[in-house]
Amino acid sequence: MSYQANFRVWRGDSSGGSLEPYQVEVNEGEVVLDIVHRLQATQAPDLAVRWNCKAGKCGSCSAEVNGRPRLLCMTRMSTLPADEPVTITPMRTFPVLRDLVTDVSFNYTKAREVPSFVPPPDLKPGQYRMQQEDVNRSQEFRKCIECFLCQNTCHVVRDHEENKPAFSGPRFLMRVAELDMHPLDAAAEGGLDRKRSAQEEHGLGMCNITKCCTEVCPEHIKITDNALIPLKERAVDRKYDPLVWLGSKILRRAN
């Protein structure tokens, strides 16, 4: 069953822009990205939008639909009110390049700042062994498709541009948490304390665990509950628990 829907799509670039009205045909079973493609084909051939797989796995088509960060390819038209205009805008946290396309290079900068997994020096590839429970803990975080919707909705950077240099955002704090809980990560042997790094270099203390990042994750990763809160707990134990503090001093002295 088809119907005509009213859309308001943000058009512009870094110098400014506005919401432009369109009326577009909607068919049963379609998603917002289908409508954007029809809009390009029939009325706005110069409309810029980033997309790739249209299967919710590449994370390319991130935008905001009626003010909520979403993947355009995973937002079904049937979930939106048919009698109200549908507003599509670019992600607000990142600079606009053109129309619905934003400059997400901030995220790649932050990704490079997270030291990678450090394998144990005495183990060779093929010799790694992990308990299934340890695999289960970190496997959830590996589902991330880097759509950066969590980064976009996090108000620490969304509402405070000045925080960006000091705050890596939920996606990369989750990466630090994943590596910190990895039983085979030998970063500490090389002098890298991932908990200290999370606090001092990635801004863990700026996260106030409102769970807005979890709410918009298309992969339903429990970013706050399973990554950020446990990482905060481990960082606090390391810094303020007197027994942990004393143990670290003794071990440091022994080495």
Image (cartoon, grey):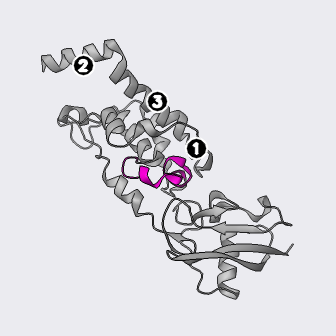
- Check if residue 38 falls in the magenta segment: no
Three-letter code, disc 2? Ser
Label tally: 3
The location of residue 171, given as percent across then percent down, is 46, 48
Give the alpha-carbon distance from disc 2 to disc 3, as whole Å. Answer: 20 Å
The location of residue 38, given as percent across then percent down, is 69, 80
Quarter of the image that includes the C terminus: top left
Residue 214 numbered mark, or none? 1
Residue 15 visible somewhere in the drawing: yes
The location of residue 4, given as percent across then percent down, is 83, 77
Q: Earlier in the sequence, mark 1 or mark 2?
A: 1
User: Which residues make up the magenta segment?
Assistant: 150-167
Residue 184 visible somewhere in the drawing: no
Residue 230 numbered mark, or none? 3
Q: Residue at x 18, y 37 (%)?
A: 121
Mark 3 residue element: helix
Mark 1 residue element: helix
Give the alpha-carbon distance from disc 1 to disc 3, as whole Å. Answer: 15 Å
Three-letter code, disc 1? Thr
Location of residue 57 with respect to 185 vertically, above or below: below
Residue 92 numbered mark, or none? none
Residue 248 numbered mark, or none? 2
Give the alpha-carbon distance from disc 1 to disc 2, as whole Å. Answer: 33 Å
**50 left or right of 116?**
right
